Amino acid sequence: MTPVWLLTIYCALVLVGSLAGGWVRLIIDPTHTRLPMAVSFVAGLMLGIVLLHFLPDATNNYTRWIEQRHGCPAGCWRCFSPTLL
């Protein structure tokens, strides 16, 4: 699958999801109880995405960064305090 088709599919899915989210407002009347529950659901979904998808990748990149720069504290010390050396 070419990148153009993949981008087209993703854009179409985002459009359908956005329209579906707007139509939910018309179908379900947001009362004082339903609206905070919906906001909490979306916040939990976003937090779950961050923790389950982005955090492992970030920790993997961070550990590689630490392994590649094992002499970074000494280098930073020399860089930011040239008068002391």
Image (spheres, rainbow, N blue to C red):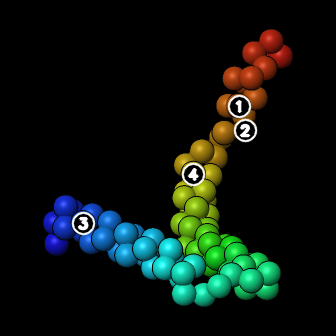
Q: Is residue 17 above or below residue 78?
A: below
Q: Is 23 situated left or right of 5 in this image?
A: right
Distance in Å between CA atoms under marks 2 and 4: 13 Å
Sequence-first disc among 3 and 4:
3
Residue 44 appears in the picture as rendered: no
What amino acid type is highlighted by mark number 3?
Thr
Looking at the rendered structure, which numbered label has been put on residue 58?
Answer: none
> Label 2 to label 1, Cα distance in Å?
5 Å
Q: Residue 74 at x, y = what percent?
A: 72, 34
Q: Examine the rendered structure and indicate whether residue 22 appears above or below residue 37.
A: above
Q: Quadrant of residue 43?
A: bottom right
Can you tell which mark lies on residue 76? Answer: 1
Which quadrant is home to the C terminus?
top right
Please, what secondary structure does the residue beneath circle 4 have?
helix
Alpha carbon distance from label 1 to label 4: 15 Å
Earlier-in-chain disc, 2 versus 4: 4
Residue at x 83%, y 16% (from the top left corner): 84
Note whether 42 is above or below 67 in the view shown.
below
Q: Secondary structure at mark 1?
A: helix
* Residue that label 3 marks: 8
* Pointer 2 with pointer 1, Cβ within 8 A: yes
Q: Amino acid at mark 4?
A: Trp
Q: Is residue 16 left or right of residue 49?
A: left
Please identify, in this view, whether the residue under mark 1 or under mark 3 is nearer the observer: 3
Mark nearer the viewer, 3 or 4: 3
Residue 65 circle label: 4
- Give the residue type at disc 2: Pro
Determine the residue positioned at 66% across, 39% down: 72
Amino acid type, residue under disc 1 in the picture: Cys
